[in-house]
Amino acid sequence: MIQETIEAKLHQAFQPEHLQVLNESYMHNVPAGSESHFKVVIVSPSFDGRRLIERHRAVNQVLADELAGQVHALSIHTYTPEQWQQDFQAPESPMCHGGSHENN
């Protein structure tokens, strides 16, 4: 499964204190069971002192093979542990045209 591969690669690269990899493909106009749209919420001390664009580039680099293949979209939410203590959750993803609120 692509989701498991993403989780493993992010754990190895960032040793996160918190990691969520959510398959949001059901929210898009794709066949049931697709693994094409993901949301990543990652909290890691390795993000300390790094600008948001640097954090996102680092995640994209780790997942370059997946992004070049079956993953069509990746929503990335990166936090330092201190930021996560203040926010405790990433923003909700919007529905896309043709998507469904129900998990298929």
Image: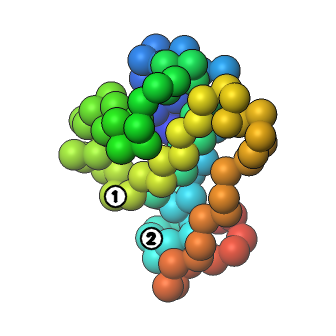
- Which of pointers 1 and 2 lies earlier in the amino acid sequence? 2
| Residue position marked by numbered label 2 in the rendering | 30
Q: Is residue 33 left or right of residue 36?
A: right
Residues at circles 1 and 2 in contact by the CB criterion of under 8 Å: yes
Residue at disc 1, secondary structure:
loop
CA gap between label 1 and label 2 equals 11 Å
Q: Amino acid at mark 1?
A: His
Q: Is residue 99 left or right of residue 10?
A: right
Give above or below for 75 relative to 54. below
Q: Amino acid at mark 2?
A: Val
* Percent of width and height locating residue 83: 67, 36
* Percent of width and height locating residue 3: 50, 38
> For the point 59% across and 72% down, which residue is it?
94
* Percent of width and height locating residue 71: 35, 51
Give above or below for 39 relative to 48. below
Asked whether 57 or 3 is in front, the reply is 57
Q: Nearer the viewer, mark 1 or mark 2?
A: 1
Give above or below for 58 relative to 69. above
Q: Residues within 10 Å of mark 2 (few under 14, many from 20)?
A: some
Q: Is residue 32 left or right of residue 65?
A: right
Q: Quadrant of residue 64?
A: top left
| Residue position marked by numbered label 1 in the rendering | 72
